[in-house]
Image (tube, rainbow, N blue to C red):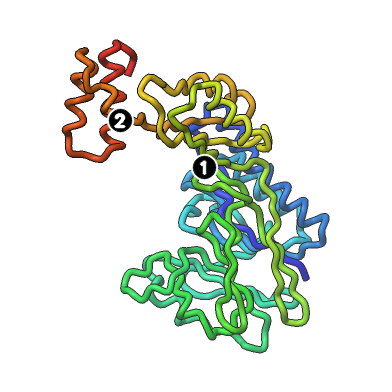
């Protein structure tokens, strides 16, 4: 029996923090498309069930079109069972008008008790974590050791033993509970570790990244359950990826050499992806990084590009020892200040621009 473990799809996100309205609208639709393509993948590859370990949606109020499209996918694939456990972002009206008889292949979980489903070669058990049950839900889990047990939860994994366990999954309390596979959601990067001698716990990560804090490969986990044993593998599936490119500048650099460094680092990144360019290092006093020039060259080559100039100038104070200009007086004054050199360099850079009448 084959299953898919997926989480943190965050469908119908606004997506407008960086993107234009048009691109944000396109990206919202792409996330919905990717969910539908996941279901198509399941249909074509003989997948019996899809485990959605929380945060299917991103906010309380979702568009009717988004809600109906997800429900239509579920209804149109009666041979696939969808196990949907709500996460901390899933307090939406998605299930408000869903009638069990209309979607018998949609299986839900509860916050008040553990719910288990006998499904083929495994028993799938889950519970929604809330502030009210966060301290006791783990100790209340009882599983039959004779079964192949898959457990679904949404929260931050921890061995933390403190009092505040809201949205915390206490791994220590789940060890020895006869879990073969613990399907988790909430962390947006793939991670798989041993839970105990019997089972493993796994974050599938998100299906599609939504920001530069979600760089790297994104997708789902394919499970194969056979003879009481669960094996798993990560399957990359994202349409677009996020990349952070760091270029270290030196005092010898001018804009042509900066652009050459960036061309070399960007040449293997697909044009449909998101790119964040970070400029580090030290430049000379008379060099000013032209961010607009970087955007003009690379902005149209990728779906989205942003540039952060974190470089600072390297001040050689001895060069201004006998400089009688206002610029020299300013540099000598800064040399006497007790502060970090990077901070001094930034102040000198701003001061130089002000003295030259440049835009700050």
Question: Within 10 angstroms of label 1, few (less than 14), some, or many (20 or more) residues?
Answer: some
Residue located at (61% from left, 23% from top)? 300
Q: Is residue 216 left or right of residue 357?
A: right
Q: Is residue 335 left or right of residue 253?
A: left
Instruction: Tally the numbered discs.
Output: 2
Residue located at (55% from left, 42% from top)? 12
- In the rendered image, residue 223, in percent from the top left (x then y), is placed at 71, 67
- Residue bearing the label numbered 2: 346
Q: Quadrant of residue 101?
A: bottom right
Q: The C terminus lies in which quarter of the figure?
A: top left
Residue located at (72% from left, 79% from top)? 229
- Residue bearing the label numbered 1: 211
**Residues at circles 1 and 2 in contact by the CB criterion of under 8 Å:** no
- Residue 29 seen in render: yes
Q: Quadrant of residue 272?
A: top right
- In the displayed structure, 296 sits above or below 123; it is above
Q: Is residue 35 left or right of residue 348?
A: right
- In the rendered image, residue 318, in percent from the top left (x then y), is placed at 26, 27
- In the displayed structure, 311 sits above or below 330; it is below
Q: Nearer the viewer, residue 338 or 322?
A: 322
Q: Nearer the viewer, residue 183 or 254?
A: 254
- Residue 151 seen in render: no
Q: Quadrant of residue 164?
A: bottom left
């Amino acid at each position: 029996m084959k299953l898919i473990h997926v989480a943190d799809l965050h469908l119908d996100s606004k997506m407008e923090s960086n993107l234009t309205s048009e691109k944000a609208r396109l990206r919202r639709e792409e996330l919905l498309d990717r969910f539908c393509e996941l279901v198509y993948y399941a249909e074509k590859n003989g997948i019996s069930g899809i485990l959605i370990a929380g945060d299917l949606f991103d906010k309380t109020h979702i568009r009717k079109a988004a809600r109906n499209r997800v429900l239509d996918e579920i209804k149109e694939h009666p041979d696939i069972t969808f196990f949907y456990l709500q996460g901390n972002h899933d307090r939406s009206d998605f299930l408000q008008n869903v009638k069990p008889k209309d979607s018998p292949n949609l299986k839900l979980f509860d916050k008040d008790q553990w719910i288990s489903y006998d499904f083929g070669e495994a028993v799938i058990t889950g519970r929604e974590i809330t502030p009210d049950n966060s301290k006791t839900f783990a100790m209340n889990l009882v599983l039959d050791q004779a079964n192949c047990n898959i457990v679904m939860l949404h929260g931050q994994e921890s061995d933390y033993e403190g009092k505040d366990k809201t949205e915390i999954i206490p791994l220590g309390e789940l060890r020895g509970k006869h879990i073969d596979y613990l399907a988790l959601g909430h962390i947006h990067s793939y991670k798989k570790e041993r839970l105990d001698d019997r089972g493993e716990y796994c974050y599938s990560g998100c299906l599609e990244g939504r920001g530069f804090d979600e760089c790297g490969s994104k997708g789902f986990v394919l499970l194969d359950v056979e003879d009481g044993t669960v094996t798993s593998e990560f399957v990359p599936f994202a349409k677009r990826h996020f990349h952070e490119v760091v270029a270290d500048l030196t005092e010898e650099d001018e804009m042509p050499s900066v652009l050459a460094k960036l061309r070399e680092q960007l040449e293997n990144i697909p044009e449909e992806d998101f790119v964040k360019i970070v400029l580090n290092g030290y430049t000379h006093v008379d060099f000013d990084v032209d961010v607009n020039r970087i955007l003009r060259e690379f902005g149209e080559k990728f779906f989205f590009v942003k540039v952060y100039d974190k470089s600072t100038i390297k001040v050689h104070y001895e060069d201004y020892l006998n400089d009688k200009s206002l610029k020299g007086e300013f540099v000598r004054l800064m040399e006497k200040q007790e502060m970090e050199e990077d901070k001094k360099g930034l102040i000198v850079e701003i001061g130089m621009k002000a003295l030259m009448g440049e835009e700050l």
